[in-house]
Each structure stands twice: as structure tokens, then as C-alpha cells.
Image (cartoon, grey):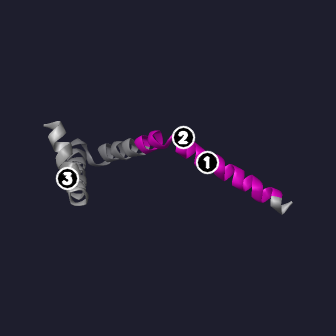
Amino acid sequence: MANNNNQNGQDSTQEVIEFFKTFKWRIIGFLAFLIIAILFLTLGFWSTILILVLCFIGVGIGYTKDRKQDFLNFLNRWS
């Protein structure tokens, strides 16, 4: 009986993992825009825009530190 319960638990865990693998980017997009919406409602428009711009600048700086040549190639493609 205990083995059957353990197997059912593993099956449901596997189903959840497959669900997240299937809808990974939809879930990430939903959570990202949920956070942005909460920021808009609590902080206001301009404060939220400032936070997002600063976050993107931070990501860009971190990316340049990680992969300098890749980032320069990326900039060349956009210019």
C-alpha cells in the first residue's frame, strides 16, 4: 500500500514537471508581467519605468562582463 502511494506521488510530481516544461515561457511571462503590474499599482508609472530601465541596464552590464564579444556582436546587429 505504501508503495502505491509513493508511486502516485511520483506520477503527480512528474505531471507537474511536464506541465512546467510545456508552458515554461508562458509561466515566466505571466509572472514577469504580474510583477510589473503590481509595481505600477503600488509605485506609479514613472517609478516603475525607472526601476525597469535600471534593471535592464544592470542586465546589460552583467552580460558585458559575462560575454563581452557576444554583447558587441549583438550591438552591431542592432546598429
CA gap between label 2 and label 3 equals: 33 Å
Q: Evaluate whether residue 2 shows in this view.
A: yes
Task: Indicate the quadrant containing the C terminus: top left, top right, bottom left or bottom right.
Answer: top left
Q: Which residue is mark 3?
A: 69
Q: How many marks?
A: 3
Q: Report the magenta residues as a range.
A: 4-30
Q: Evaluate whether residue 57 shows in this view.
A: no
Task: Indicate the quadrant containing the N terminus: top left, top right, bottom left or bottom right.
Answer: bottom right
Q: Which mark is residue 77?
A: none
Residue drawn 18% across and 38% down? 77
Q: Secondary structure at mark 3?
A: helix
Q: Amino acid at mark 1?
A: Val
**Residue 76 at x, y percent in the picture:** 15, 41
Q: Nearer the viewer, residue 53 or 72?
A: 72
Residue 25 falls in image quadrant? top left
Q: Which mark is residue 16?
A: 1
Rendered position, 26 above or below 57: above
Instruction: Specify whether residue 10 is painted magenta.
Output: yes
Extreme residue in the bottom direction: 2
**Residue 18 at x, y percent in the picture:** 59, 45
Q: Amino acid at mark 3?
A: Gln
Q: Which residue is mark 2?
A: 22
Residue drawn 25% across and 46% down? 48
Extreme residue in the left direction: 79
Residue drawn 71% across and 50% down? 11
5 relative position to 59: left or right: right
Pick whichever of labels 2 and 3 is earlier in the sequence.
Answer: 2
Q: Nearer the viewer, residue 22 or 73?
A: 73
Q: Secondary structure at mark 2?
A: helix
Residue drawn 25% across and 48% down? 52
Q: Nearer the viewer, residue 61 or 47?
A: 61
